């Protein structure tokens, strides 16, 4: 049954996504599950009847942002109630999973708290709220009547979610693996996303073919530990990520393939070899190392040392010499000394990254790292973060500058910053701005790169070898 408003207009949902690409994928799937109920997408919370905050719990400030947004939504809800209308607020994602009922206590205006494994149950949760609202009268549902589903249900949400609908400008995400069994001592993911789960090969390949048929030229397969993928194959055998990547690479029409996020421990020989063998696999890999100090890597329970990481990098570059790397770094993990931090800076110099994400260590309740006594003072973390970012910033600029003068295929995706400009991505995931027609969104076009900057490049579309459909 479709949900319509009392004024006969279709209901609208606004979904705000925080955090990682897996949340982006999940938000799209939630939109897909709500569409058959009659929910169209709203552009802003004040145009919506239902707001879903798809949250991230990875660092402290990420969850605090959610609570301040909930305060604003409560005010909107109060306005709607004054007009005798309902306004439903749902909190999804990892904050929902981690804090559960605490969210309903801290912000009683919230109607639904739903964990990442229960999105297929959203229609039932909405129906529960609607039943309560019908009993109370329009706009009269009292704060504190919220419903909660943070179970890890026995069924997989993937088997119960509708097939993906929209492709954004030629590119799509495809979740193939979720959860994590590695228990790095700083990280909440094993607690919020649960144990490692790999989708069966047939389901992944079917979704990949469907996305390509719907116009995806580029697929990014996703997982919290994507290279720990061990899905059941059609013949009952277990497939690794490399086997899956090789099979996806054979889908006619697919030009680009990426996977993220990988763990160094799971970079096996065949996956490294695939970087040389599978032309669709893009020459860019996000391979987080977190720290360059063996002592800290050990305390983080990463299960690898700096030498293993450096060896993997060398072998990847032997397999594909134009491979660019990016990484995540945490500065100020408990006990990190100046010497440990210097080791991280030395590793960055040795590898040479095309980009990197760096974070100050954030103490997450319930993780082993939070209980350690030798926490690093905040001012030290700030100084280390600045030094690290300056170094990777220099490397990123040098990498972008090194591409100037070459002609590369760019997948255009969205308007640029200046009038008449469009923006797209190179095989190395660099942002390129060029004068061009928005009808090129979702197309791969050769671009001559003119100049490289800290975070992007300026390019010029090579004319003559593409047509824009009228
Ligand atoms: N599974 C991936 C891996 O093993 O590298 C990373 C997943 S996590 C969602 C993304 C990044 O957030 C991590 O690589 C780490 O750098 C950062 N992160 C996780 N927990 C953190 C914490 N407590 N404080 C600061 N950064 C954190
Ligand atoms: Fe978190 Fe470590 Fe698992 Fe990555 S491997 S999700 S950092 S516990």
Image (spheres, rainbow, N blue to C red):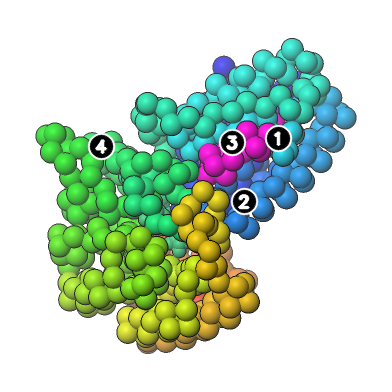
Query: Which mark is nearer the camera, 3 or 4?
Result: 3
N-terminal label among 2 and 3: 2
Q: In terms of secondary structure, what is the magenta stretch mainly?
A: helix
Q: Position of residue 448 (x, y in %)?
A: 39, 80
The reply, left or right, for residue 414 in relation to residue 173 is right
Residue farthest along the front direction in this orientation: 373
Residue drawn at 54 percent across, 28 percent down: 149
Q: Which mark is residue 200?
A: 4
Query: Which mark is nearer the camera, 4 or 1?
Result: 1
Helix, strand or loop for disc 2 = helix
| Boundaries of the magenta span | 87-104
The reply, left or right, for residue 9 in relation to residue 443 is right
User: Toward the viewer: 348 or 169?
Assistant: 348
Helix, strand or loop for disc 3 = loop
Check disc 3: other Cα within 10 Å, few if <14, some if 14-19, many if 20+: many
Picture quarter with ligand 2: bottom left
Residue 93 lies in magenta, yes or no?
A: yes
Q: Position of residue 203 (x, y in %)?
A: 28, 36
Q: List the residue tagged with mark 1.
A: 105
Whether 159 is drawn above or below 371: the answer is: above
Q: Which mark is residue 100?
A: 3
N-terminal label among 2 and 1: 2
Q: List the residue tagged with mark 2.
A: 63
Whether 364 is drawn above or below 131: the answer is: below
Helix, strand or loop for disc 1 = helix
Is the CB of the residue bearing disc 1 within 8 angstroms of ligand 1?
no
Residue drawn at 60 percent across, 56 percent down: 60
N-terminal label among 3 and 4: 3
Q: Is residue 161 visible?
A: no
């Amino acid at each position: 049954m479709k949900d319509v408003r009392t004024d006969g207009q279709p209901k609208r949902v606004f979904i705000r996504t925080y955090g990682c690409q897996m949340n982006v994928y999940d938000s799209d799937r939630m939109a897909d599950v709500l569409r058959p109920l009659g929910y169209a997408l709203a552009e802003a919370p004040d145009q919506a009847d239902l707001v879903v905050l798809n949250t991230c719990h990875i660092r402290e400030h990420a969850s605090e942002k959610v609570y301040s947004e909930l305060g604003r939504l409560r005010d909107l809800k109060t306005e709607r109630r004054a007009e005798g209308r309902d306004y439903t607020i749902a909190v999804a994602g990892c904050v929902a999973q981690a804090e559960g009922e605490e969210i309903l206590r801290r912000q009683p205006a919230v109607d639904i708290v739903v964990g990442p494994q229960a999105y297929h149950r959203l229609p039932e949760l909405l129906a529960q709220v609607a039943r309560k609202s019908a009993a109370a009268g329009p706009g009269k549902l009292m704060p504190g009547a919220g419903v909660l589903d943070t179970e890890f249900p026995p069924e997989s949400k993937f088997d119960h979610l509708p097939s993906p609908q929209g492709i954004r400008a030629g590119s799509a995400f495809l979740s193939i693996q979720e959860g994590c069994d590695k228990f790095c001592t700083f990280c909440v993911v094993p607690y919020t996303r649960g144990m490692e789960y790999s989708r069966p090969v047939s389901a992944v390949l079917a979704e990949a073919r469907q996305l390509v048929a719907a116009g995806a030229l580029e697929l990014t397969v996703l997982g919290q530990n994507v290279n720990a993928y061990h899905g059941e194959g059609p013949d009952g055998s277990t497939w690794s990520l490399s086997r899956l990547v090789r099979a996806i690479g054979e889908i006619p029409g697919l030009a680009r393939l990426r996977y993220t996020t990988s763990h160094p421990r799971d970079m096996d020989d065949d996956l490294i070899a695939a970087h040389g063998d599978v032309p669709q696999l893009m020459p860019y890999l996000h391979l987080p190392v977190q720290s360059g100090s063996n002592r800290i890597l050990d305390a983080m329970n990463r299960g690898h040392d700096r030498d293993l990481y450096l060896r993997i990098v060398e072998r990847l570059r032997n397999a594909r010499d134009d491979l660019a790397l990016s990484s995540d770094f945490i500065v100020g993990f408990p006990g990190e000394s100046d010497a440990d931090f210097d080791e991280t800076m030395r590793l960055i110099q040795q590898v040479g990254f095309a980009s990197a994400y760096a974070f100050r260590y954030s103490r997450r309740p319930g993780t082993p790292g939070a209980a350690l006594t030798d926490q690093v003072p905040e001012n030290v973390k700030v100084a280390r973060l600045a030094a690290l970012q300056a170094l990777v910033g220099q490397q990123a600029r040098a990498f972008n500058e090194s591409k100037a003068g070459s002609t590369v295929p760019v997948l255009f995706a969205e308007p640029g910053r200046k009038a008449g400009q469009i923006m797209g991505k190179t095989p190395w995931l660099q942002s390129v701005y060029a004068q061009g027609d928005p009808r090129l969104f979702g197309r791969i076009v050769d671009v001559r790169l003119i100049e490289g900057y800290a975070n992007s490049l300026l390019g010029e579309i090579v004319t003559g070898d593409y047509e824009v459909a009228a």
